[in-house]
Amino acid sequence: SVIPKPFPQGWEHKTNNVNSVHEGNIIGSGIFISPKGVLEHAGSVGLSLIVWVCGGGICALGSLCYAELGVTIPKSGGDYSYVTEIFGGLVGFLLLWSAVLIMYPTTLAVIALTFSNYVLQPAFQNCLPPFIATRLLATICVLFLTWVNCSSVRWATRIQDIFTVGKLLALVLIIVVGLVQIFKGHYDALRPSVAFEFSQDPSFGQIALAFLQASFAYSGWNFLNYVTEEVVEPRRNLPLAIYISIPLVTLVYTMTNIAYFTSMTPEELLASNAVAVTFGEKLLGMFSWVMPISVALSTFGGINGYLFTSSRLCFSGAREGHLPYLLAMIHLKNCTPIPALLVCCIATVLIMCIGETHNLINYVSFINYLSYGVTIAGLLYLRKKRPNLARPIKVNLLVPITYLIFWALLLFCSLYSEPVVCGLGMVIMLTGVPVYFVGVHWKEKPKWIYILLERVTYMGQKLCYVVFPQADSSETEPLTAKAID
């Protein structure tokens, strides 16, 4: 059989436009989801705004560390590739396991539920949309976009380009209307004497949960490291993307939240199931319909983007032999990773049926931060073990140390405040240990296991009409039982 390449033929391209790519992947639907959770845990308007600003600062520290790792270990695959290279297969597999089972599907579930909430909220203005209706619409959306991604890479990328406009339109509209409100003098909730009136006594645990909620909106800051091999001049362009995009995104998020508070009291924001819709109803009058449509477009594009990028991680995992080779196969004609997309789709639908949006955010953000911390700890470990390794970018040691101190405090306080939600994420991650030793480390398995795997792979190939990516398209042909042997 042929060793899988990291990406399907036709996906491999270089890009110089890393600033727009970076900003486009950070600025997502999270800004329409997280403000309620941040305010709820922060307990005051002033502290919630501080959390948004500091959250951007922490992302900047993490991004600088990832920039060093990206040019020192120039592999696509991000955290997974770095941790596998530094700490070995087990730790890398646990990150991959948690990403495939938790991070990507849970993020997709949250965005899909937000899409359905914003679409349905105008029809249920005085109450929450029905549970069944939101889940059904979210499921239809995920199934449709999975079909699109399975059918054509070109369709998927065009949807991403088109629906990015909705995201930017909504944010620009919110910020501009908010500035108009400030100039008119409608900023009572932002006065220091009012902004720091706490609805509950602040605690480290609640502040940590507020950071987890904000981190969901900032997730995507490490996206460029998943496609390092496709970036032109990463030594120059990775830091440049960080210095431009992170401050810009932080400014946009902070201004968006300030705009919310020019029209809504903290109580109104917490009572809203779709913050941007409530904002539009209060300030846009007859044009209030623009807001739910813009956010729906944004979230629709966000689902498509996560489905598209999740397959890259599966390819990296299969390249290292940590995932079944079936997940690294692509459609014979369309060059789309159908098995990987189907796995992600099924996991997403299952999570949507059992989770509530804000709990899911705490759940996925905790695992994300756990992965970030392990990866940045790997940077320090690599500095000690291989001090003479070529590092085109080398950050000051205070950067990773500061990040790790914040990381340890955040995870400890979050685990203390939400032991069930955060603990469950850790348990699911650790279930990957026996899977690794049985599926990857154990090389001399009984013959019947290999025969079973071959049959399952062959059936999957026939069902999805997929093969390994080939360097030469003339070599591409379906695997047969004889070829597998």
Image: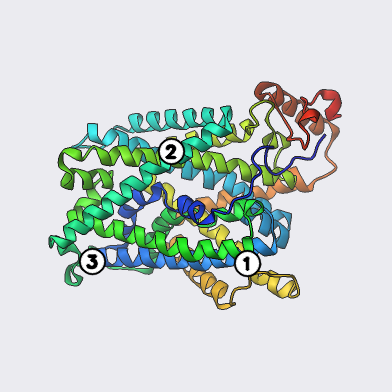
Disc 3 is placed on an element classified as loop
The answer to whether the residue labelled 2 contacts the one labelled 3, judged by CB atoms less than 8 Å apart, is no
Mark 1 or mark 3, which is nearer to you?
1
Q: Are marks 1 and 2 in contact (CB under 8 Å)?
A: no
Q: Is residue 31 above or below residue 195?
A: above
Q: Residue at x 71, y 54 (%)?
A: 90
Q: CA distance from mark 2 to mark 3?
A: 41 Å
Q: Quadrant of the C terminus?
A: top right
- Label 1, secondary structure: give it: helix
The residue that label 1 is drawn on is 68
Please state if 453 lies on the left or on the right of 374 as rendered.
Answer: right
What residue is shown at x 31% (from left), y 51% (from top)? 172
Of the two numbered discs 1 and 2 in the rendering, the one whose residue sits closer to the viewer: 2
- Residue 404 lies, in percent from the top left, at 54, 70
Q: Which amino acid, by three-letter code, is at mark 1? A: Glu
> Which residue bears the numbered disc 3?
198
> Is residue 430 something one can see in this rendering?
no
Q: Residue 183 at x, y = what percent?
A: 16, 62
Residue linked to disc 2:
162
Badge 3: residue crowd in 10 Å (few <14, some 14–19, many ≥20): some
Disc 1: CA contacts within 10 A as few (<14), some (14-19) or many (>=20): many
